[in-house]
Amino acid sequence: MGRTSVQIREAVPRDAEELLTLWVDYAERKAARLLPPTTSEAYRAIIRSADNPFESLQVAELDGRLVGVAHLRRSPLSPLHDEEAVHVSHLYVDPDTRRRGIGRALLAHAASWAEEQGSAHLLASVSAGSRDANRFLACLGLAQVATVRCVPVAVLRQRLNHTEPEADTPALQARRRTLLRRQISSRTGRGVSAHM
């Protein structure tokens, strides 16, 4: 099958509903713990992106419908660099339209945008569990440099507030040996020497 012509363009407010459909599918497939945005939130996000010269929300349109999206943002390559890079996130193509060059077209457009911005590097974030997406990016020469994780702040606070695990002290090691001896003793039905 030949590649269908796909149009890559900046998202506009009328895209809000279709973008939400793509977002819900994306979030479900990635098991994201994010509540879906409302239509008005999506609408405001599109306007906010269009008003920011360092950000771009790109959509892929095929036969009059949105089939892909990529969020582009220009920011420093790292906290210690002056040099800026284009960060590509939320790169997603509708599963029904994959293998038609849509992801490649989105990244080609991202590379052009990076050149317009004067950025020599492009970083792309995709789900660590998506083997196909990671293989696709690797084939295009993108090396893995990080794993991005997400958590609600309330959940992180709850986990941080739990007491830290005990240090592996000699007393803790002795307790573990005693428990191990008891477990072995109960399985075998006889005592175990204290000199294990």
Image: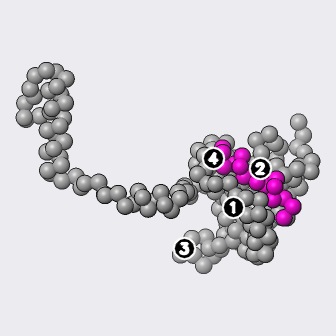
Question: Which residue type does callout 4 highlight?
Answer: Lys
For the question of whether residue 48 can be seen, the reply is yes
Secondary element under disc 2, as helix, strand or loop, is helix
**What residue is pinned by disc 2?**
21
Question: Number of marks in the image?
Answer: 4
Q: Residues within 10 Å of mark 2 (few under 14, many from 20)?
A: some
**What residue is pinned by disc 1?**
88
Q: Is residue 30 left or right of residue 72?
A: left
Question: Which residue type does callout 2 highlight?
Answer: Thr
Identify which residue is drawn at 67% across, 59% down. 89
Any mark on residue 79, and which? 3
Rendered view: 97 above or below 19: above
Look at discs 4 and 2 and give the one toward the viewer: 2
Residue 50 image-quadrant placement = bottom right
Q: Position of residue 72 (x, y in %)?
A: 72, 65
Q: Residues within 10 Å of mark 3 (few under 14, many from 20)?
A: few
Give the CA separation, mark 3 to mark 2: 34 Å
Question: Which residue type does callout 3 highlight?
Answer: Pro
Identify which residue is drawn at 61% across, 54% down. 34
Look at discs 3 and 4 and give the one toward the viewer: 4
Q: N-terminal of the two: label 1 or label 3?
A: 3
Any mark on residue 30, and which? 4
